[in-house]
């Protein structure tokens, strides 16, 4: 079984470079299916398992996809298939994002119904409501969503009940090729939405308002290939900001865009962490003592749920009582039990978690429950006494490239092992060095 083994106690120092954003590249790859003319070239693509999975989905749909040196080219000019089967959707829920493109391009799409996952039930009703408003007939049965439209989709006025990131993206993609204008209200404002809109506009689409609560999309009859650079990953950047802060370190996070992480930076500043804008990034300096604070996750520009578990690690190290309230996903506290295995003084109260700090964290074997929990438990391991072993790394690989090597380059005592023998050797070596 693969594990990360980390021994706590090192202050991190140096520079770490952030990859392209997972949550930007996945919808952008799904959107390449809209180009009936020319190839799309996407740069700054992170080598994540999710990227390999969505590439497989596109190949299954009859597109040509090449991925090398952080660059993807997609040729989707042939006739496309219409079905994304369960084997892909099960691996990665974001596979559902091909639905809008397929429906707009083919007039038909059949996608396996994504199940719930460790963080919540994650329905797709808002995506489907948008497609229906544009004239699609949607049927759900036998584990599949079947959508079909007579002729072209029609522009419509669509109000989202919640600013869902995925629904905003899926409907926006579908609307680019619809007949007439679509107005979407109460949409998500995440930087990844803006990146997708920029990509679509480079393909010849007419999307206005990305980054605000209202989108106006004038449908066009055809889209073409283009070249696009993916924005930096603000969640990976945030994870390294926490790594610097939790160890009292001094780290430059190269590629971090302060405006994309303003809520996180504000909350970390409240805790006593210092930030300095430098060329190409952000310098993060951890204080001697961290202060307790309260956090509530919200859609952007509120505090991101994808940073909730990493901040939980940081608050475990802070002096005083903190509270984290999760409002985006109904079940994103699975990592709490794992922190308790590390001696964290932490308890769940409804949709909130109360943390009494500072906890004297102890190394233990802990299992990642989702990709951010994998990172968060490793961060806690950076300050725990002894060895922390993090398992279930398939989650980590969905969202982080070379996580352990990047931390090691900053001075962390960390290795990734794939067998019991390797694990024993690493621990013996670490004990000798200590
Ligand atoms: C690949 C990707 O970009 N994933 C991100 C995306 O996920 P994703 O796009 O799935 O997240 P959404 O914004 O859609 O979901 C937020 C909430 O809305 C609910 N909901 C959503 C759609 C719907 O039709 N009905 C409904 O009830 C969900 O169950 C959840 O409780 O945004 C989340 C919220 O910032 C992030 O945590 C994920 O990392
Ligand atoms: C929840 C996340 O991703 P996904 O929506 O791909 O599961 C995440 O990136 O933290």
Image: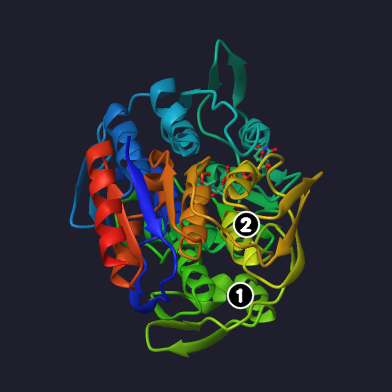
Q: Note whether ligand 1 is within 8 Å of mark 2.
A: no
Q: Name the foreground residue: 127 vs 418.
A: 418
Q: Which disc number belongs to residue 207? A: none
User: How far is disc 2 from disc 1 in space, using C-alphas?
Assistant: 15 Å
Give the x, y percent position of residue 287.
57, 84
Above or below, 11 relative to 299: below
Q: Residue at x 62, y 33 (%)?
A: 124
Helix, strand or loop for disc 2:
helix
Q: Is residue 74 visible?
A: no
62 vs 295, left or right, is left
148 vs 32, left or right, is right
Q: Which disc number belongs to residue 262? A: 1
Q: Quadrant of residue 46?
A: bottom left
Q: Residue at x 66, y 44 (%)?
A: 333
Q: Residue at x 53, y 75 (%)?
A: 245
Q: Which disc number belongs to residue 308? A: 2
């Amino acid at each position: 079984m693969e594990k990360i083994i980390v021994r706590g106690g090192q202050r991190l120092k140096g520079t770490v470079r952030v990859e392209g954003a997972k949550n930007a590249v996945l919808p952008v790859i799904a959107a390449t299916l809209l180009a009936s003319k020319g190839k799309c070239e996407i740069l700054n693509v992170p080598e994540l398992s999710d990227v390999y999975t969505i590439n497989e989905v596109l190949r299954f749909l009859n597109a040509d996809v090449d991925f090398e040196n952080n660059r993807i080219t997609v040729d989707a000019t042939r006739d496309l298939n219409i079905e994304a089967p369960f084997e892909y959707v099960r691996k990665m829920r974001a596979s559902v994002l091909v639905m809008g493109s397929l429906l707009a391009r083919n007039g038909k799409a059949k996608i396996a119904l994504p199940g719930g996952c460790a963080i919540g039930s994650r329905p797709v009703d808002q995506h489907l409501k948008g497609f229906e408003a544009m004239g699609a007939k949607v049927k759900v049965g036998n584990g599949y969503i079947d959508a079909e439209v007579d002729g072209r989709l029609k522009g419509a006025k669509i109000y989202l009940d919640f600013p869902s990131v995925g629904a905003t993206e899926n409907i926006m993609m579908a609307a680019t090729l619809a007949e007439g204008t679509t107005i979407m209200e109460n949409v998500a404002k995440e930087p990844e939405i803006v990146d997708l809109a920029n990509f679509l506009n480079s393909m010849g689409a007419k999307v206005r308002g990305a980054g605000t609560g209202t989108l106006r999309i004038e449908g066009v009859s055809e889209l073409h290939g283009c070249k696009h650079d993916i924005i930096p990953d603000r969640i990976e950047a945030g994870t390294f900001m926490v790594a610097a802060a939790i160890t009292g370190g001094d780290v430059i996070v190269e590629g971090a865009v302060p405006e994309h992480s303003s809520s996180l930076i504000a909350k970390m500043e409240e805790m006593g962490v210092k930030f300095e804008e430098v060329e190409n990034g952000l310098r993060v300096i951890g204080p001697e003592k961290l202060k307790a604070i309260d956090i509530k996750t919200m859609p952007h520009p509120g505090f991101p749920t994808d940073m909730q578990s990493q901040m939980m690690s940081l608050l475990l190290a802070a002096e005083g009582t903190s509270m984290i309230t999760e409002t985006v996903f109904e079940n994103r506290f699975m990592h709490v039990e794992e922190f308790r295995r590390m001696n964290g003084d932490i308890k769940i109260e409804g949709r909130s978690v109360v943390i009494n700090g500072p906890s004297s964290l102890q190394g233990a074997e802990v299992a990642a429950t989702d990709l951010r929990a994998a990172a968060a438990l490793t961060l806690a391991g950076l300050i725990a006494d002894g060895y922390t072993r993090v398992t279930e790394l398939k989650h980590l690989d969905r969202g982080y490239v070379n996580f352990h090597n990047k931390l090691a380059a900053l001075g962390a005592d960390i290795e990734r092992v794939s067998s019991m023998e390797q694990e024993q050797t690493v621990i013996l070596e670490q004990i000798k060095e200590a």
